[in-house]
């Protein structure tokens, strides 16, 4: 057989890693290697099915799917959370993912009237109101404007909302999984608004969805002209129906509710519209009964995804803690991690890319001695904002809120390696 040119270096690399790994693991790995040598390992000694027969040919999977052994890596929902499946939410399996990009099929879904299935040739985007020319675009029209590619996180304002009054859901998928991060391709909203021509009194936009919920929100013109996008692709392929195919609004760093999916119309006005979604919903009720409105930006937040309740610790000795941090105000500058409930903090190893308004991946290699841990992470963004504890947040916001909970999460790891959602702040 022809030698793979990559082989010598990768084999060496593996050997080097093993050596380092063994040294770090101390006795644990050495015993298991010895044990393996004593009892013949069928994974090495026996011929396997996949060695002996040809596999599927090239046309067997015209659209590739994950390995059959990854079937547990799925979006999940919590049935008691919502009254219907059509106005509901499911959650990204954060504990199963790595890097910063969320695969399209695993992006959490939040819709208020089910998934609209729209033939792209029948989709239209109308721009009306305070513009020089009211315009209607087809998808083909939009694809003829100069294009941009940008990676952003989207977080629902209700992410971690169930945790306001105390630890509740057992798993980072459920406590923090209303977030995803993908690369969008599309047109800057500014480009299309300039084509319509904004009147001098144009101060607000109202994007509106074509789904049965007709989702609509008021967006200030400064944001629209800054970095909003009309996106038709995610991670290189057309948007998924769940994410608003064929067109969605991208509102970087701001609460997910404003990222109108199945976008069919943008009205331009001189005042906000005070829609349902910015009055009775997506407002922050304070302790004194007053509600904060238009709290659009998602503040810095982080979560340790591994270990976590759905991803227990399995080995003593060397382990790698992993997690995600993000900020709607800019880039993540530092992430601190504690294993003892906040007595000692260390800076985590941020593994790039580190982009503004994006998920950022961090790791902390650590030795586990089998004793209980209280694991937390704390994000700091490049504006200097420090992610608060849950109690710090409650001092300002009270306990009536659902939305915008960016408090520090704690996982309690027991001696058997299992983790549970607790609060120590
Ligand atoms: N747009 C429309 N047209 N209909 C909706 O129900 N839900 C909003 C927003 N845009 C919604 C919508 C909410 S609350 C969120 S958090 C995001 O879409 C979720 O985006 P995703 O489903 O791509 O994760
Ligand atoms: Co939402």
Image: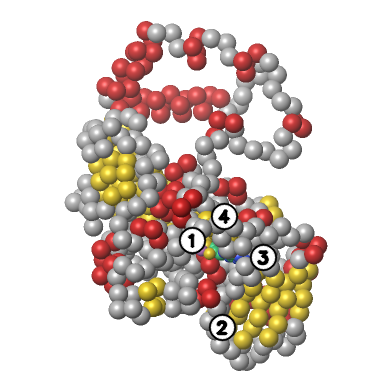
The residue depicted at 40 percent of the width and 29 percent of the height is 17
The residue depicted at 74 percent of the width and 27 percent of the height is 57
Q: Nearer the viewer, residue 269 or 335?
A: 269
Tag 2 or tag 1, which sits nearer the N-term?
1
Numbered disc 4: secondary structure: loop
* Mark 2 sits near ligand 1, with its Cβ under 8 Å away: no
* Mark number, residue 273: 2
Instruction: Decide: few, some or many residues near mark 2? Use Cα within 10 Å; few <14, some 14-19, many ≥20.
Output: some
Answer with the quadrant where ligand 1 appears in the image. bottom right
Q: In this view, does 260 lie to the left or right of 146?
A: left
Q: Name the residue under label 1.
A: 155
Instruction: Decide: few, some or many residues near mark 1? Use Cα within 10 Å; few <14, some 14-19, many ≥20.
Output: many
Number of the front mark, 4 or 2:
4
Tag 4 or tag 1, which sits nearer the N-term?
4
Q: Mark 3 points at which residue?
A: 211
Report how far apart the C-alphas of labels 1 and 4 lie in the structure.
Answer: 20 Å
Q: Name the residue under label 4.
A: 85
Residue 281 position, x and y percent, is 48, 72
């Amino acid at each position: 057989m022809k030698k793979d040119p990559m082989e010598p270096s990768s084999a060496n690399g593996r050997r080097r890693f093993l050596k380092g790994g063994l040294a770090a693991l101390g006795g644990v790995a050495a015993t298991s290697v010895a044990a393996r040598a004593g009892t013949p390992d069928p994974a090495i000694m026996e011929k396997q099915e996949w060695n002996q027969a040809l596999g599927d040919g090239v046309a067997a999977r015209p659209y590739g799917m994950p390995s059959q052994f990854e079937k547990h890596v799925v979006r999940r929902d919590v049935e008691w959370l919502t009254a219907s499946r059509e106005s509901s939410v499911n959650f990204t399996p954060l504990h199963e993912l790595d890097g910063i990009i969320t695969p399209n099929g695993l992006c959490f879904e939040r819709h208020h009237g089910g998934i609209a299935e729209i033939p792209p040739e029948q989709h239209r985007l109308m721009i009306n109101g305070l513009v020089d020319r009211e315009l209607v675009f087809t998808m083909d029209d939009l694809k003829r404007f100069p294009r941009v590619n940008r990676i952003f996180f989207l977080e629902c304002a209700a992410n971690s909302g169930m945790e306001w009054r105390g630890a509740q859901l057992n798993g980072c998928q459920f406590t923090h999984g209303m977030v995803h991060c993908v690369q969008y391709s599309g047109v800057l909203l500014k480009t299309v608004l300039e084509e319509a021509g904004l009147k001098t009194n144009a101060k607000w936009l109202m994007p509106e969805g074509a789904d049965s919920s007709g989702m609509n929100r008021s967006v200030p013109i400064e944001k629209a002209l800054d970095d909003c996008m009309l996106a038709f692709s995610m991670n290189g392929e057309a948007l998924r129906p769940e994410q608003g195919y064929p067109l969605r609004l991208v509102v970087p760093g701001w609460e997910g509710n404003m990222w109108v999916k199945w976008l069919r119309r943008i009205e331009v006005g001189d005042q906000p519209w005070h829609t349902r979604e910015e009055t009775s919903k997506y407002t922050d009720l304070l302790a004194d009964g007053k509600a904060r409105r238009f709290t659009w930006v998602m503040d810095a937040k982080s979560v340790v995804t591994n270990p976590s309740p759905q991803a227990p610790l399995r080995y003593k000795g060397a382990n790698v803690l992993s997690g995600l941090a993000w900020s709607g105000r800019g880039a993540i500058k530092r992430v601190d991690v504690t294993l003892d409930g906040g007595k000692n903090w260390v800076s985590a190893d941020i593994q790039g890319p580190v982009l503004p308004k994006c998920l950022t991946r961090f790791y902390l290699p650590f030795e586990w001695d089998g004793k209980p841990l209280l694991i937390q992470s704390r994000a700091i963004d490049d504006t200097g904002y420090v992610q608060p504890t849950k109690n710090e947040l409650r001092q300002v916001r009270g306990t009536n809120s659902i939305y915008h909970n960016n408090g520090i999460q704690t996982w309690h790891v027991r001696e058997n390696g299992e983790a549970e959602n607790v609060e120590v702040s």
